[in-house]
Image (spheres, rainbow, N blue to C red):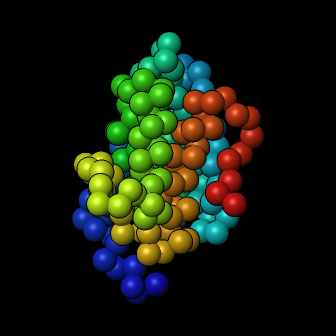
Amino acid sequence: MEDLGELYQELILDHYRNPRNFGTLPGANRSARGHNPLCGDRLDLAVLLEGDRIADLRFRGSGCAISTASASLMTEAVKGRARPEALALFEKFHRKVTGREAEGAPEDLGKLDVFAGVREFPVRVKCATLAWHTLKAALEGDAGTVSTE
Ligand code: ZN
């Protein structure tokens, strides 16, 4: 796992040690649970939807640095956004971390770009996308646990 060293950039470590929007969310009206069996990451996500807008969201769980930091940065990225906007951002993020961006048209996703390096590590792609899959399930009202497998 030494080659992963460069992935653990400062921003990821910061969000791993001090995850934003971490905890429970009283009054949440959407929730979903995510599990990445390959790495053991677990995530509970609670969302407060007001109309079609993500008014607030929080997560809990235990996972590796990448999954925790990704969850933290995901909550920052989608808070306040309309549901379709958040889902569109997930699509962009997914293309970014799987290396399927359109040729010659890299998209600037701000802080989320820190995860672009995981495309070299398929197992880590699951860690980075777990929170997003869980968000999608919460927004679409799917019951049960989302698994990356
Ligand atoms: Zn992980």
The front one of 33 and 86 is 86
Question: Nearest the camera: 61 or 75?
Answer: 75
- Taking the image as shown, residue 48 lies to the left or right of residue 8, namely right
Q: Is residue 77 visible?
A: yes
* Residue at x-position 52% and y-position 48%: 131
Locate residue 106: give its quadrant.
bottom left
Q: Where is residue 45 shown, x and y percent of the image?
A: 55, 39
Give how far across and how far down residue 125 sits, in percent. 50, 64
Q: Is 3 on the left-hand or right-hand side of 148?
A: left
Q: Considering only vertical position in the picture, is 66 above or below 90?
A: below
Figure quadrant of residue 103 = bottom left
Q: Is residue 21 visible?
A: no
Q: How many numbered discs, if any?
A: 0
In x, y percent, where is residue 94?
47, 53
Outermost residue on the top side: it is 51
The residue at the point 31 percent across, 77 percent down is: 6
Instruction: Indicate whether 133 appears above or below 7.
Output: above
Q: Is residue 22 left or right of residue 61?
A: left
> Relative to 87, is 91 above or below?
below
* Image location of residue 59, percent across then percent down: 50, 41
In the rendered view, would you say 123 is above or below 54?
Answer: below
Q: Residue extending furthest front?
A: 103
The residue at the point 63 percent across, 49 percent down is 34
Q: Quadrant of the C terminus?
A: bottom right
Outermost residue, bottom side: 2
What residue sits 45% from the left and 60% below the top? 100
